[in-house]
Image (spheres, helix red, strand yellow):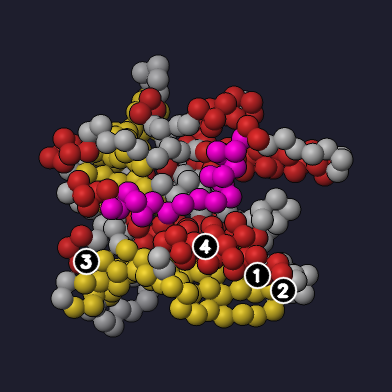
Amino acid sequence: MFEDKQGGLTPITNLGEFSLIEKLTKDFPSFHTETLKGVGDDAAVIKLGEGKVQLISTDLLLEGIHFDLRYVPLRHLGYKAVAVNVSDICAMNGKPYGITVSIGISNRFTVEALEALYEGIRLACEKYRVELLGGDTSSSRQGLVISVSAYGEGAENTTTYRNGAKKHDLICVSGDLGAAYAGLLVLEREKAVFLKDPNMQPDLTTYGYAIGRQLKPEARTDVIGLLENLGVLPTSMMDISDGLASELHHICHQSKCGAFIYARNIPIDYLTSRIAGELEISPYTFALNGGEDYELVFTISLKDYEKLKGIEGLHIIGHITDEPGRVQMELKGGSVVDVEAQGWTHF
Ligand code: ADP
Ligand code: MG
């Protein structure tokens, strides 16, 4: 399967995103013992001394791939570009302190449009208390390109990696899942209607929560604070950018373990279920494969169960097993299925 080479060369479609990254980055040397983590987690971790670490994460957003300016307001886009990077700092149990922002712009954009983008960036800086440290500006042939890097700080002994989950640990998620993807599908549906008949004005009022989750996600800095107050240090943690299934596979792959989750424990908002019903898709598909919720998924050791039990907004959805790489889910009816992950499959 997938052995089709073009004149001896391998099309990138032969590899999934994660195998491609692994292939490209595996032979790089490490020169500095201060680099505690390079490629492979939500952020890189660099030792600073006195038990402190610096966290660095970067993300690239491309028009037409990650966003569609026909329904994404530039202000929201600016906000989101910052929030998703801050989210990666949270995923390491760190505190964000600054960002750099690089943009590629075509002459299609006006000064006012870019000011709107930066207004969103500024709002997010205010919300997360991060400083704009710099960036770069270039022209682009087509469309808008935004790359944001976030810098944060943490402590060496409280940094949470993807590789720390152990058998019997409990798997937890914050907030609710699938709403961002439900919001995206509603926006796409309305766009299709609008393109057919520009006089049709969409009525999106009853979809507000899901659309908001898609257009203006928040990084869960509050959950990091909550865990600290509860005295719970997760054994592993990630943010949910690609969907719960993909993230659980990352944790299992890196922690050399398996996961067992219960569908009935996955937090799904009522509106997400309603939209799933309208579109005749399972709401679990939204939660598992939708992505862009920017909630946190983390594991805790059993001894911390009492501290976390019943805390509003945190949900225990399953436990870690010793079957490497296997993610299973018990459906509401009691049958158990293997959960595959998108992003691990091909481009
Ligand atoms: P996230 O979804 O948390 O932002 P990604 O899946 O984008 O993480 O990336 C996973 C890891 O691979 C990260 O450590 C990231 O820095 C690294 N990575 C991704 N793309 C590249 C690349 N082109 N070159 C080097 N490292 C990369
Ligand atoms: Mg991440």
Q: Is residue 272 visible?
A: yes
Which numbered disc, 3 or 4, marks the residue that appears first in the sequence?
A: 4
**Residue visible at 54% across and 30% down?**
271
Q: Nearer the viewer, mark 3 or mark 2?
A: 2
The answer to which quarter of the image holds residue 103 is bottom right
**Residue visible at 24% across and 75% down?**
47
Residue bearing the label numbered 2? 111
Label 2: which secondary element: helix
Residue 94, image x and y in percent?
Answer: 30, 62
Q: Give me the C-alpha separation between circle 2 and circle 4.
A: 18 Å
Residue bearing the label numbered 4? 123
Of 119 and 160, the residue lying toward us: 119
Residue 208, image x and y in percent?
Answer: 60, 38
User: Looking at the magenta stretch, what is its main secondary structure?
Assistant: helix
Label 3: which secondary element: strand
**Mark 2: amino acid:** Val
Q: Does the residue at mark 2 contact the one at mark 1 (Cβ under 8 Å)? A: yes
Q: Is residue 71 magenta?
A: no
**Mark 1: amino acid:** Glu
Which numbered disc, 3 or 2, marks the residue that appears first in the sequence?
A: 2
**Mark 4: amino acid:** Leu
The answer to which quarter of the image holds residue 212 is top right
Question: Which mark, by number, is residue 115?
Answer: 1
User: In what quadrant of the picture does the C terminus appear?
Assistant: bottom right
**Mark 3: amino acid:** Ala
Label 1: which secondary element: helix
